[in-house]
Image (cartoon, rainbow, N blue to C red):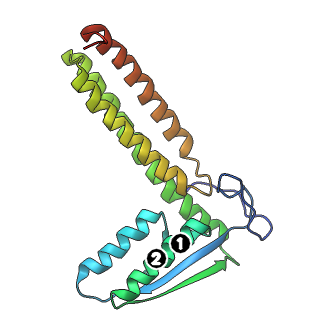
Amino acid sequence: MAQTVGQPGPKGDAGRADGHLAEGSGVRWLVLVYKVPAEPTRLRAGVWRKIKGLGAIYLQNSVAALPQGPGAERSLRVLRNEIVEMGGSALLLGSEVLSGSAEIEQAFNAARDDEYEEIVDRCQDFLGQIEKEYRAEHFTYAELEENDEDLVKLRNWFAKVENRDVLAASGKAEATAALARCEQVLDEYAARVYAEEGEGR
């Protein structure tokens, strides 16, 4: 789902100390144009997964874009090299959008918002699991450890999405709140486990 983003400002590479682009700054893009052999199909699927894993968006078939940055450039250079080594061809371009900048930024933010929304959904599943533990009166260290591991996975997932959310997608706030709620509920559950089993066991 596309979210409204601010109109781009003057051209340039203005950014913030945290690596995220300042709101209203002109956004430069890295564009990977590639072609991979038709067979085996796993090659095409593998490239697609890596591009999605980087948080890039597709402008059209075999044309992917990421906001320009040192980390993004390194990753796309490596991917370009892998494509060439598998017998394909690829060009990596640095560019600015002369027309349609709002649309490409919205598409990039929509991709991040989809990821944030999925995190919110997983947080709801996590809360449902804790509620299930209460109903079943499962207050053990084994259950606490398992749920703690699940929360760590959610935190790590959020960190990955946040790291590539360089255009400040609006969905971050809801995901942050959902994760905070999970942490609060797990703390409360942990307190119950300590009370039931004792802290020294």
Q: Is residue 69 left or right of residue 13?
A: left
Contact flag, marks 2 and 1 (Cβ < 8 Å): yes
Q: Tell me the residue that label 1 is attached to.
A: 74
Q: Is residue 3 above or below residue 75?
A: above
Residue at 37 percent of width and 90 percent of height? 88
Q: How many marks?
A: 2
The residue lying toward the viewer, choosing from 54 and 123, is 54
Q: Where residue 143 sits in the image (x, y, percent)?
A: 23, 25
Q: Quadrant of residue 72?
A: bottom right
Q: Is residue 39 above or below residue 173?
A: below
SS state under label 2 = helix
Assess disc 2: are there few (<14), some (14-19) or many (≥20) residues with their C-alpha within 10 Å of its C-alpha: few
Q: Tell me the residue that label 2 is attached to.
A: 78
Residue at 56 percent of width and 73 percent of height? 73
Where the C terminus falls, by quadrant?
top left
Residue at 26 percent of width and 17 percent of height? 134
Assess disc 1: are there few (<14), some (14-19) or many (≥20) residues with their C-alpha within 10 Å of its C-alpha: few
Q: Is residue 193 left or right of residue 121?
A: left
Q: Quadrant of residue 173?
A: top right
Residue at 47 percent of width and 47 percent of height? 116
SS state under label 1 = helix
- Amino acid type at mark 1: Arg
The residue lying toward the viewer, choosing from 192 and 110, is 192
Q: Is residue 93 visible?
A: yes
Q: Where residue 5 sits in the image (x, y, percent)?
A: 65, 56
Determine the CA span between mark 2 and mark 1. 6 Å
Q: Where residue 34 sits in the image (x, y, percent)?
A: 44, 85
Furthest residue to the front?
A: 200
Q: Is residue 131 above or below residue 77?
A: above
